[in-house]
Image (tube, rainbow, N blue to C red):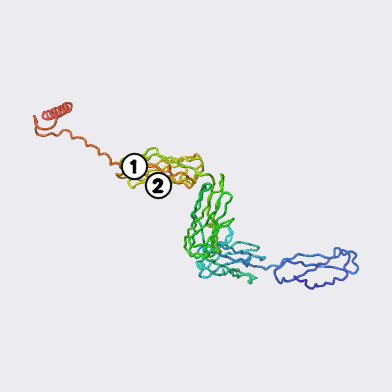
Amino acid sequence: MPVQSWPRCPLGAIAPGESHVVTVRFNAIHVDTFSVSGYVYSNNDGYGGNNSASVRVQARYRRDVLFDHPGIAFSAVDGREGQGTIYVTARGFEAATNVVATLEVPAAVRFKSVSLGDGASAWPCVMETPQRLRCTKSAYGPSAFDYLRFGFESDVPGNYAVHAVIHGDGDTNPANDVVDFPLQILPFEDVRISGLSGGTSFSIGVSRELQLTLNTDRRLVAGVVVRAPQLTPYLQLESISSPGVACTVDGTRGECNFGDIPANSSIPITVRYRGLQDKPGWSVLEVSASALHDADPYNNYTHLDYVVGASTDLALAARANSATGTVGSTLNFPQITVINGNGMASSPMVEISLPSFVSIASVSAANGMCSGSQPLRCDFPPLPPGGSIVIDLALNALSVGSQSIIVRVTSSSDNNASNDSTAVNLIVNAASATPANPPSGGGGGGGGGGGGGRIEWPVAVFVGLLVTRRQWRRASRLD
């Protein structure tokens, strides 16, 4: 603030012990903090150290409500909700009354939510239309500060503005009551990659292919690149490939440059690694995808845990070679056991091809995930050397049938397929008919006496006593 001219006040002669009061009145030109200084001097003043004094002055508007930080901007991707925050401030010496704050956006943008302030000091807010918000406060200030938070979305990419207006009765600085905040809606370009999960064991000297899938969402995605790492000295990336795409592999990584990918695409990718040397502890193999304007980077990675070791021999056996039941009963399938050899077995999978005349009643496989029925498939995590798998299966017998069932185990690190499967004969018979009880009594008219079947003697005695008793009662009534 520039120094203004100094007014002079001649005081004449001042007697010993006498004092004078000097009053300065001024008008602040704009909001600022400054000093007002005064000086006194005389021709015969013997000491000048106490000849000046200063007063610190803060100039503010009497009432002033405004949107602070007008340089902020908001953005979101189309089809997804974005969040915005605007700072509402009162800087006057007195509270402004009947304060109203409104936000407006163009027709291509929609408001989803609004709040201003927190707790007991929150402003009442309403969404008058999808394009207009309104918050009110009966009195606001002085020296107050709140957050105006709002949610918004749009399906149309483009550059827009949030038109913000705030005013109150007695606001002495209307120049800061209107602000247009930039709002950008970006196109939702999203690429995601999947296919790797769980744990996998690689065998030394053996190559293994991993299948991945690259997907895009509802819009074309520009500048897509997929990268797979070299993991020497344990794993060597031998190749990365995708139909119609030129991919390269060097000493640090493999890369496929897809360029622009159309919307709603699903593209297969194959990476092949070869085990080089023993790696007993688990490590991470991660393949990534990137794009120039990707809206969601959190789905750009897929990974698995891996170990590298010697190949192994998985052996499968069934407790019995047949199982028999009757329609309507539950029959127990012979217990299945898998024994691992001297190496780590990578993700063993047991498959049982069940016929249609049975259904699964229950299945138990420790550490395994079983699904399906024709066939039933149980997937297991890597199996350590000497480890085993046990599967117990109960079946509902639905109809008569007979079939030889193949049970098989597979693993990419298995080096002996001759003991990976066995056959079980599954037989369901018809339920046995229950014989009917033969009829008693009844007899034909032949034979001596008057027809009828034989009556045992205890029954005859009972009937005779009953007749005699009835005759006695009849005689008594006649008397």
| Residue 273: % across, % down | 53, 52
Q: Which amino acid, mark 2?
A: Leu
If the image is split into quadrants, where does the C terminus sit? top left
Report the number of discs.
2
Is 455 left or right of 70, judged from the image as shown?
left
Distance in Å between CA atoms under marks 1 and 2: 15 Å
The kind of secondary structure element at disc 1 is: strand
Q: Is residue 214 above or below residue 473?
A: below
Residue visible at 90% across and 65% down? Answer: 46
Q: Are marks 1 and 2 in contact (CB under 8 Å)?
A: no
Q: Nearer the viewer, residue 154 or 256?
A: 256
Residue 365 in the image: state x and y as whole percent.
Answer: 44, 42
Q: Nearer the viewer, residue 100 or 357?
A: 357
Q: Residue at x 50, y 51 (%)?
A: 208
Q: Quadrant of the N terminus?
A: bottom right
The disc labelled 1 sits on which kind of residue? Leu
Q: Earlier in the sequence, mark 1 or mark 2?
A: 2
In the image, 108: left or right of 469? Answer: right
Q: Nearer the viewer, residue 87 or 31?
A: 87
The location of residue 200, given as percent across then percent down, is 51, 48
Does residue 375 sit above or below 117 in this rendering? Answer: above
Q: Is residue 470 left or right of residue 111?
A: left
Label 1 sits on residue: 426
Residue holding disc 2? 376
Left or right: 334, with 455 as reference point = right
Nearest the viewer among 135 and 449 is 449
Q: Position of residue 52 (x, y in %)?
A: 83, 65
Q: Using the rendered view, name the quadrant where residue 255 is placed.
A: bottom right
| Mark 1 or 2, closer to the camera | 1
Judged from the image, the secondary structure of the residue bearing numbered disc 2 is strand
* Disc number for residue 339: none
Q: Residue furthest front?
A: 205
